[in-house]
Every structure is written in C-alpha cells, then in structure tokens.
Image (tube, coloured by chain):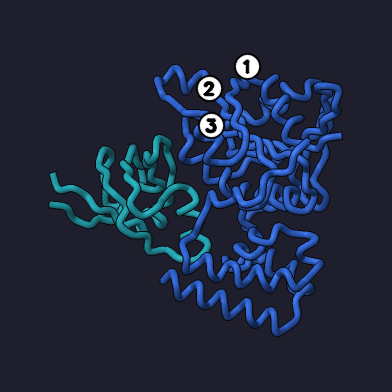
Chain colours: A blue, B cyan
Amino acid sequence: MIRAALIGNPNVGKTEIFNRLTGLSQKVGNFPGVTVEKKAGRLVHQGREIEVVDLPGTYSLTAHSVDELVARDYIVLERPEVIVDIVDGTNLERNLYLTLLLLEMDANLVVALNRWDMVKARGMEIDIEKLSELLGCPVVPTVAITGDGLEDLKDSIVDAAGQKRAKGQDAALNYGCDIERLISKVEDLIRKSPALVEKYPQRWLAIKMLEGDEMAMEQTRACLSSSQLAEILSIIEAVEAAIK
Amino acid sequence: MSMMKRLDELMPGQGGRIASISSCGNLRRRMMEMGLVIGSELKVIRLAPTGDPVEVLLRGYSLALRKNEAKQVILEVDAA
C-alpha cells in the first residue's frame, strides 16, 4: 500500500482534492494526543492501493502551532511515501514557501498546481516543465472543483512512490556560504548520533536546530552528549552573529 | 524623493516598499513567513473603524495585521 499525505496552504482546494481522490471511503479521527482532525481515505489506482491522509492547511512548518506541528511530525516521523503539496496556481509566490520547506524535509514530493482554470482565465502563464525542473519534482495542473487533472495526479503519486527522490536536488534552497558552512557543521554532529540519523532528515534537523526550534532541540537532547550540545549551541550563536 | 513611514501611518490607497521590520523573535519570523519581507511592495486596502486591524495587499493577496504589528513595519514611501 502507498501512503500519501496531502498538504498545502489553507484555502487552496486541498479538501476538495481529498474528497475527489477518496470519494466515500474516508474516515475521520484525531491525530494522537491533539484535537486536530485527521481524515484518511483509500483509493485504488493502477491496481495499487493508496491511503491518503489530509493534513491541516498551513503556511509554514514551525513548532508554534498545533496544526503545523501535526503536519510536520507526520511528514518527518511517519515518512509517508509521497507528499502531495497542493499549490494555488494563482498565488504561486506565496504558496511555494511551503513547497521549499517540504523539499528541505527530503519529502518525496508531487506538486498539484490547483486552480489551473483560474490561472488560465486570468491570462497568467506558468511554465510547468520549468517549475518541475527547478523544484526537482513532478508538477501536475489540477482543477479540484471539476476533477480535471486528478487522473494525472494519481498517476504521479503511483510513479513517485516507486522512486526515491534523487539526492542532491535539494539545492533548491541555498542559504549562502556563511550559513551553509554552519549547517554542515551541525550536520556532522548529527551524523555522530545513529538514533538521529535513523529518525530525521539530517539537513532539515540541522536547519531547525540552528533556528533554535524548540521541538527540535527538545527531541534531540537525549540523543546528543553534553559536549555535542554545547558545540551546537555555540554554532547557533555564530549563526545569530552572522545574520545580525 | 522618498521617505520612511510606519505602516500604521498610511491611509487606504497608500503603499510603499518594506525597508525594515523592527519586531524580533517568533513574531518577526511569522511576519516574514506571511510575505512581509524587506524589499516587497505593499499597499493599504482598508482600515477597520478603530484603525486596527489594517488590511494590506501584497504579492497579489491580502493580509490583515494588528495595529501593533503594522507599527513594526517601516516602509519607503514615494512622496507624490
């Protein structure tokens, strides 16, 4: 079975796509421990069974709100085979922020470029091939309210599940050599802890630690020695000095 | 000629380019995530009767800010 998670900014048509994909097979529950609704449904495509989970709509993936934390923990800890990022095509610039965060998490991404009918109606032009090349993942135009493009989206989910995302394509976000140097220092420290390597995408964790992300610090404390922690804290100080 | 103004000092229809954001920590981060980044252009669409919140248009979408938050956004405004 393929596990796929739907994510996207609020009001991009995410739930409409979820309903179209799963029809009447969905179940509503809660994410364990928090009152954020979890909707999951199933479908069969090309003979493969796909379980789809609808994650809360978010603009970002910080640890500051329950919705964002639920979405982020699901992606990092449950590691669904495919993440479908639903993007409002009429508002690309705003929506791609989340897309870049997802790429940073090493997510095996498929981008659904929704509201494609509106994009055309407004006379906007989006070079889908170029976007796909720059992001290093498939981009599928969709119209949630009519269902256009959803068969292509299902094809892309099945295709993506069969292949790991090529490493080294995550050059999508380069923070500049000062910060990059410090990111790789923290990554080196993370690599010394097998428990962390096993559990988290290393670059993502390094960046979160440098941001001073509370959850990242809390969840990793047990896996690092006190000297390693001290070293990371001094690198964080160096980052803050560098961006002042 | 351009001058610096705080976002909460603008009237509907006026706009400018973000020169700096004086908030820090989580609020600064959140504001940047919502698209308030140095160099981006924005325009005030309307104000609530008390002047709080403020609705602005940026990057093709609208965003509502508390007056407290708007005060922290410094804009470069073209003096027309």
Q: Which residue is mark 1?
A: A148
Q: Which residue shows up at 61% across the image and 30% down it? A: A112
Write down the chain letter for disc 3.
A
- The quadrant in which residue A164 appears is top right
Could you tell me which secondary element the residue under label 3 belongs to?
A: strand
Q: Position of residue A44 (x, y in %)?
A: 84, 23
Residue A107, compared with residue A182, is above or below; it is above
Is the residue at mark 2 from the same chain as the one at mark 1? yes
The reply to whether the C-beta atoms of the residues labelled 2 and 1 are less than 8 Å apart is yes
**Crowd around label 1: few <14 · some 14–19 · many ≥20 (10 Å):** some
Q: Amino acid at mark 1?
A: Asp
Q: Which mark is residue A116?
A: 2
Q: CA distance from mark 2 to mark 1?
A: 9 Å
| Foreground pick, A13 / A228 | A228
Write down the chain letter for disc 1.
A
Q: Position of residue B54 (x, y in %)?
A: 38, 45
Q: Is residue B48 visible?
A: no
- The quadrant in which residue A16 appears is top right
Q: Which residue shows up at 78% across the image and 36% down it? A: A162
Write down the chain letter for disc 2.
A
